[in-house]
Image (cartoon, rainbow, N blue to C red):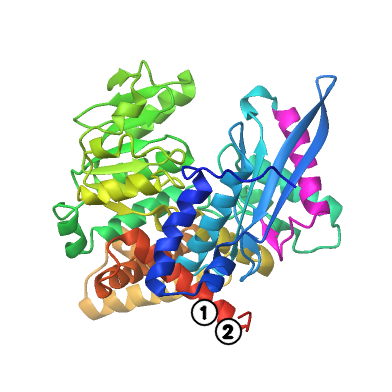
């Protein structure tokens, strides 16, 4: 078993528990039921040796299963030098509540490997990843029916492909082997739109917020996303896609981008794609010509803006800096970027917070689509796309005959075009984010005991989980 969980009130898991406890008190759940929902079902710690550069190195990893009220349990695997059991348990719990909130029928799980990937070559990382996968499979913590990982910090399509291939060789008769993990390359059973999914979900979440005048008033924001000043912390997969889509499709002004080594800012707006390409090429945006660089990345969170999107790591806004935050709306694209104490300080200042348990649910939503695709063994849209195009062409022809005028090529193309897999994925994600926010909005404004969106989200999630336990007679 792993080391005992941190007891400090500032630990990640204790912050999650304190937020959940507040929702429990509103729902008046008895202590036993609350404990059953909150408790982490199981935690696996593994230690395994791998021969690297002629020497044996021992690596430590974890996989936590918070809840199996729905199967499989779902959650990413991160490779990071700061990972520990407390973090893994907290993230597993968030996955349980997140899936329940957005109606994805999974339990919550999470995994991590204590490693700095930058210190190892590609071939070495493959050896380590496959060995970690072997441990998970042997212990029953990796299976298409019971426990399905996905990418997280430090992992991506490459690692997911290695995991799936390792599982396949260990289970050669499992025809659903591709469903043992999501976030794979498209050629290896992945789904189009998965890489962008979490960032795209952030965009859809913000769009839905701006459709509700009452919530805009609470945040002291005017209608319309165009021209809003946005600061993004973290230019990884989530931050990059969220900022890129918001800038290119919603015409927001990205005034600052914060990274581990500093912040690049420009009050007239940064070109996200140019900043990203510059960072990829140079390893940093320190010398980026389109903005002003400062090494004060912590202080950058306190810059004035309309929307602040923390898309990096947990506990970035704490009671130490919360009083100096000047954003009107905080959108938690990362997991747990605001501590429990900071949350209250920010709300007392009148800052509206869109919680992580909702905002970054795009990843698990599209992972759900990928899992279904793998189990059905067919690409979405394969059977109906050409039929839809044929019917669209008939509608266009009838319209021309009825009006006596010919449609432009672009109009006809728009009517005729059948939905691709990416179109369907984005449509399903948009629908999921809209429905979840509308449920949060209704819950917030229909219960005097609920004062913020985070509490509304947890109340909804816990109500659904407790109902599922009751339905099967667990208590």
Instruction: Please provide the residue range marked out in magenta.
Output: 122-148
The disc label shown at residue 145, or none:
none
Specify whether 475 is left or right of 292: right
Identify the element where label 1 is drawn: helix
> Nearest the camera: 96 or 212?
96
Residue plotted at (55% across, 57% down)? 93
Q: Are marks 1 and 2 in contact (CB under 8 Å)?
A: yes
Tell me where residue 1 appears, x and y as whole percent. Answer: 75, 47
The disc label shown at residue 467, or none:
1
Tell me where residue 268 appears, x and y as whole percent. Answer: 19, 30
> Nearest the camera: 292 or 44?
44
**Label 1 vs label 2: CA separation?**
6 Å
Badge 1 density bin: few <14, some 14–19, many ≥20, Cα 10 Å: few
Residue plotted at (46% across, 68% down)? 461
The disc label shown at residue 471, or none:
2
Residue plotted at (55% across, 73% down)? 33
Residue 45 in sight here: yes
Badge 2 density bin: few <14, some 14–19, many ≥20, Cα 10 Å: few
Specify whether 291 is left or right of 25: left
User: 78 above or below 108?
Assistant: above
Tell me where residue 301 appears, x and y as whole percent. Answer: 30, 33
């Amino acid at each position: 078993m792993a080391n005992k969980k941190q007891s400090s009130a500032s630990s990640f898991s204790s912050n999650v528990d304190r937020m959940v406890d507040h929702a429990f008190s509103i729902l008046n759940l008895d202590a036993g039921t609350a404990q059953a929902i909150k408790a982490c079902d199981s935690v696996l710690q593994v230690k395994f040796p791998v021969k690297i550069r002629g020497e044996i190195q021992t690596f430590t990893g974890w996989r936590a299963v918070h809840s199996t009220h729905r199967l499989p349990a779902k959650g990413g695997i991160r490779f990071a030098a700061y990972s520990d059991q407390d973090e893994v348990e907290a993230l597993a719990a968030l996955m349980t509540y997140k899936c329940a909130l957005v109606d994805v029928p999974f339990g919550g799980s999470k995994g991590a490997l204590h490693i700095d990937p930058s210190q190892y070559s590609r071939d070495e990382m493959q050896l380590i990843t496959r060995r970690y996968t072997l441990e998970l499979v042997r212990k029953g913590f990796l299976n298409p029916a019971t426990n399905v990982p996905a990418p997280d910090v430090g992992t991506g399509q490459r690692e997911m492909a290695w995991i799936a291939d390792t599982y396949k060789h260990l289970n050669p008769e499992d025809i659903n082997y591709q469903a043992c993990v999501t976030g794979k390359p498209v050629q290896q059973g992945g789904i189009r739109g998965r890489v962008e999914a979490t960032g795209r979900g952030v965009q859809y979440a913000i769009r839905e917020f701006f459709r509700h005048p009452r919530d805009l008033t609470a945040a002291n924001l005017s209608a319309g996303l165009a021209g809003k000043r946005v600061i993004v912390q973290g230019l990884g997969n989530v931050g990059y896609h969220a900022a890129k889509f918001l800038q290119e499709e919603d015409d927001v002004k990205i005034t600052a981008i914060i990274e581990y080594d500093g912040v690049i800012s420009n009050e007239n707006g940064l070109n996200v794609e140019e900043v990203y390409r510059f960072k990829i090429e140079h390893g940093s945006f320190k010398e980026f010509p389109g903005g002003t660089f400062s090494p004060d990345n912590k202080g950058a969170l306190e810059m004035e803006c309309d929307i602040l999107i923390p898309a990096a790591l947990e506990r970035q806004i704490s009671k130490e800096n919360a009083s100096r935050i000047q954003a009107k709306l905080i959108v938690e694209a990362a997991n747990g970027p605001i501590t429990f104490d900071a949350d209250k300080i920010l709300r007392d200042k009148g800052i509206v917070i869109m919680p992580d348990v909702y905002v970054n649910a795009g990843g698990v939503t599209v992972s759900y689509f990928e899992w279904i695709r793998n189990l059905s063994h067919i690409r979405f849209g394969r059977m109906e796309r050409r039929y839809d195009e044929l019917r669209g062409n008939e509608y266009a022809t009838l319209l021309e005959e009825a009006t006596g005028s010919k449609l432009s090529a672009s109009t006809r193309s728009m009517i005729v075009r059948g939905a691709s897999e990416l179109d369907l994925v984005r449509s399903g994600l948009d629908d999921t984010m809209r429905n979840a926010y509308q449920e949060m909005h209704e819950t917030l404004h229909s219960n005097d005991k609920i004062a913020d969106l985070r509490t509304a989200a947890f109340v909804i999630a816990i109500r659904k989980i407790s109902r599922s336990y009751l339905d099967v007679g667990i208590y």
